[in-house]
Image (tube, rainbow, N blue to C red):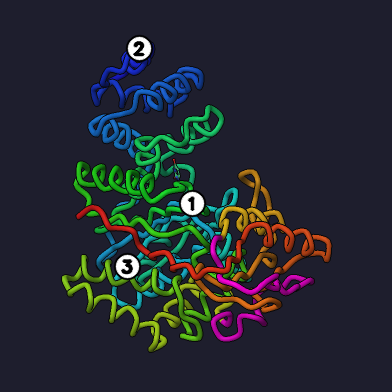
Amino acid sequence: MSLTDPRRVLEVKRDGGRLGPDELRAFILGYARGEIPDYQASAFLMAAFVNGLDDAETLALTRAMVDSGRTIPLEGVTRPKVDKHSTGGVADGVTLLFAPLAASLGLAVAKLSGRGLGHTGGTLDKLEAIPGFRTDLEPDAFERQVEQIGCAVAAQTADVVPADGALYALRDVTATVPSIPLIAASVMSKKLAVGTDLILLDVKAGSGAFMKTPEDATALAKACAKLATDWGHRTRCAVTDMSQPLGDAIGNALDIQEAVALLRGEMHGRLRDAAVMFAGEALSRLTGVAMGDGRARAARAIDSGDALESFRTMIDAQGGEAAVVDEPEAVLPRAPVITLILAERDGHLTTVDAEALGRASADLGAGRKRKGDPIDPAVGIVFRPKIGDRVESGQPLGSVHARSEEDAETCLIRIAAAITIGEDPVDAPPLVFGWYGD
Ligand code: URA
C-alpha cells in the first residue's frame, strides 16, 4: 500500500487514535524510501511519544522496520541459534564471554553488534582492541563462521533495519528517545531481522543504564517480551542491575584483558555470574536441560578451559592475534600512564554513579561523543570494589589508564566524586530483578 496523504497518519496519532497496520507500514516504508520528509516523520514520532502506541501498532511498526531492509535468515546454520543483547551499560562485557561460552556448549551465537556511544561501551570497539580483529564480515562469511565454530560477532550494516537508523537519528534530535514502544520496536527490530531460535535480552536498570530504575526497566522488558510473543519469536528478557559497573574494566583493551582472565578462571564475580546465567538460560531453553544443569554446564565450560578455546578460535577466525588469550598484556595496547585509585577513607562502598565512571572513561578517550569519532583502545578505568564491599583508607581500588598525567589526575577527581564510602554496611544489590517472556 502506498500512502496517499501522510497527514492522515499524523492526524490519527495527534488525536490519540489507533493506526491500522497497513497505514503505519506505508508511512514507515515511505519514510525509509525517502518519500516522506523528516518533518512529517518527526511529527509522527512526537505524537507517538505523547499518545503512545498500543501492542498492535508497536508490532506493525516493528514489522515495517524489519521489512525496510535485508534480513539475515541464517538458514545454513544447523546448531540451535541464540542472540544475546544488552540495552547498554558500563563494564558490561557479557557478550565477550557469552559468545564463546555458548559456542563451547554446542550453541550458535550470531551476534550483530553496535559500537559504544556516550557512557556505554560497545562490544565491537572492545574486540577491535585485539590487533587485527575484523568486525566487517560479509553476510556469507558471517553465517559460515557461525556454522563452523559456533560464534561470530560482526558490525551491523546499514542495510539491516535501515528505518531504525533513520528514525533513531530523528528521535535523538526531537527528544523522543525515551518512549517504551519506540525503544521496544527499535531494539527488537534489529534482533528479529536475524533468524535465531531464541533472543535473550538484558535490560539494564540503574545509574549506568538508560533506564534508571528497575520499574522502568521492567516496563521495557515486558514490552519487548510482549512484542516478541506477538511476532511469534521465543524471547526471554532479564532485568539486571546496572547501579554499578558490572565488571571491573571500563575501556576496551582493559575489557578484553578482563574477559581473558575470567575465561581462564583467574577471576570470579558478577560479570562471570551474568554470563553463566545467560548461557545456562540459552542451553536450557534450546536443548531442554534443567535450568540448574544448564548453569552448571556453563560454569564447567569456563573452568575446563573450553570457553577460552572457543574465544581463541573466534579471534583467529576474525583475523585477530589469538595469542591474546595466552598473553593479553603482551598483545594488547597499553596506556603510557597508569595511576592507582586509592580509597580516601575507611568504610563500605555505598553508591557508585556508573554513568559518571563511564563518562570519565569515555573522556580519557575510551568512548565517543558522536557516532564515528575515533576511540583510544588502550585507555580506561579499572574499578574493582562492588557496592557493599568494605574498604580501608589508602587501599587501591583499581587504576586509571591514561594518555597523560593530566588526564589521569582529572579522571581520579571524577572517580572520587562518583562514589560514596559510608560508615554503615550496605547490602549488595541483586544481580537480576526478574525474567519476562517465554
Ligand atoms: N537502543 C536501541 O537500539 N534503540 C533505542 O531506541 C534505545 C536503545
Residue range (magenta): 323-351
N-terminal of the pair, mark 2 or mark 3, is 2
- Residue underneath mark 3: 108
Q: Which mark is residue 159?
A: none
Identified by mark 3, the residue type is Ala
- Residue underneath mark 2: 11
Identified by mark 1, the residue type is Ala
Left/right of residue 135 with respect to residue 185 in the rendered view: right
Q: Quadrant of the C terminus?
A: bottom left
Image coords of residue 122 (percent x, y): 53, 57
Secondary structure, mark 1, is loop
Identified by mark 2, the residue type is Glu
Q: Pointer 2 and pointer 1: residues touching (CB < 8 Å)?
A: no
Residue 332: within the magenta?
A: yes
- 10 Å neighbourhood of mark 1: few (<14), some, or many (≥20)? many
Secondary structure, mark 3, is strand
Image coords of residue 276 (percent x, y): 35, 73
Q: Quadrant of the N terminus?
A: top left
Disc 2 to disc 3, C-alpha distance: 45 Å
Which quarter of the rendered image does ligand 1 occupy?
Answer: top left
Of residue 152 and residue 91, the one placed in the foreground of this image is 91
Residue 243: within the magenta?
A: no
